[in-house]
Amino acid sequence: MTDTSSCLSRAPENRALSAAEARDRMLAEVVPIAGRELVPVRGALGRILAADIIAPHDVPAHDNSAMDGYAVHFAGLAATGETRLTVVGTAFAGSAFSGLVGKGQAVRIMTGAVLPAGADTVVVQEATRLEDGVVIVPAGQRQGQNTRRAGEDLARGAVALPAGKRVGPAELGLIASLGIAEVEVRRRLRVAFFSTGDELASIGKPLAPGEVYDSNRYTLHGLLTRLGADIIDLGVVPDRPEALEATLAEAAQAADAIITTGGVSVGEADFVRDILDKLGEVSFWKLNIKPGRPMAFGRVGKAWLFGLPGNPVAVMVSYTQFALDALLRLSGLDPLPERPLLTVAAGNAIKKQPGRREYLRGQVVAVDGRWQVKITGNQGSGVLRSMSEANCFVVLPEECAGVNAGDSVQVQLFDGL
Ligand code: AMP
Ligand code: MG
């Protein structure tokens, strides 16, 4: 029998190292890098602010009109019936009316134009009639309507954007709206990475028997480039202690963080463990998840080490669920973004034993106007094709004992806008 509700709730369990526990442990240890630099506004896209951005003036800077219409003095309008006002000029966006709107007068005004002295209210053009330079305004206007007040978005001296915020398109526009040309951001995180495995072949050469092409470095290239890190690709390292030790030492010199793939599973970890003990302080974790059960985390010299499993999909799961948040924290991001879990109907049944948290590859699709998620084929932890076809992870909590088609499940979408 499938217990529907248990596939939605978050597990309170604590058997092996749970996903939540692993993430919390990592985040408790890493601290942001200190370096900062000044960049032109456009160059700040994707970067993390190193200091608060303070509004140097009010936004908007002046009271202005939100509509095309007539700027009037509200107190001069008749409470009932029409009011006839002489049009004494025009205010354009960027070209203000310099006079005063006196008793019995109005100024024609365009959207964005500064509200002339004496006017406090804008009557939209469509509500009025114009007769020989006289505008006729009906009753029923509200004081202040259709105007935008100086400082309504941001008051001068207010924190427009806090330090620790990642700059996206809205932030670029906001910074520009303040007239600021350069911003102080954290320097980019330097991340070194390499693949381990005697069976790994480099692309562009024929495969010898028993070899597989090294794909993890390409996936990581994509993930880390998107993160906005400066990347150092150290290639493929064979399963030889001296080679691994030399590469780790090189990586620790060059980078803030090191990501390795492969070599952390039970069968392989022994010599890796010895080297990591020698060079730093690294814990080997067994996580209560699938895929991505083995993982190493700790320090090698001054650098943080994330030892991810070798299987290509396990790499993506452990990166996105664990390493990513730690890398963001290292980069100076604060607070960390909460990745939303959305509830949708399962488009098909999913087999699962209670015990581990599972991340399945799914595609959220609209069926007859309702969103549901379908599992994208073979879920083997080496199968990248089903990853590529997916637009989300279906996250099944530890206690979930299987899903029937139509049950509610939680998904984590890969991309936003
Ligand atoms: P490991 O964690 O080193 O035992 O590797 C687990 C599985 O992932 C093995 O089948 C490896 O051949 C495969 N694998 C490890 N590293 C890579 C890589 N860089 N690219 C593709 N497959 C890999
Ligand atoms: Mg290996």
Image: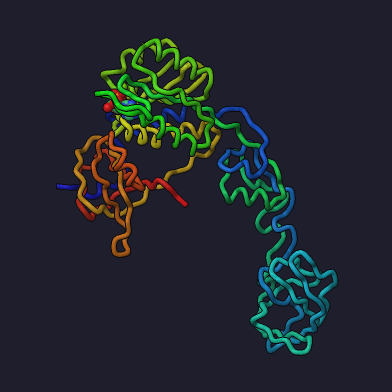
Asked if residue 309 shows in the view, the reply is: no
Tell me, what colour scheme is on the image? rainbow
Count of numbered tags: 0
Farthest residue in the left direction?
1
Q: Quadrant of residue 92?
A: bottom right
* Vertical relation: 372 (above or below) 212: below
Q: Quadrant of residue 216?
A: top left
Q: Position of residue 278 (x, y in %)?
A: 42, 10
Q: Is residue 304 left or right of residue 142?
A: left
Q: Position of residue 127 (x, y in %)?
A: 65, 82
Q: Position of residue 74 (x, y in %)?
A: 73, 76
Q: Is residue 56 left or right of residue 252?
A: right
In percent of the image, x 56 and y 41: which residue is there?
Answer: 46
Image quarter where ligand 2 lies: top left
Q: Nearer the viewer, residue 288 or 372?
A: 372
Q: Nearer the viewer, residue 267 or 332?
A: 267
Q: Is residue 219 left or right of residue 92?
A: left
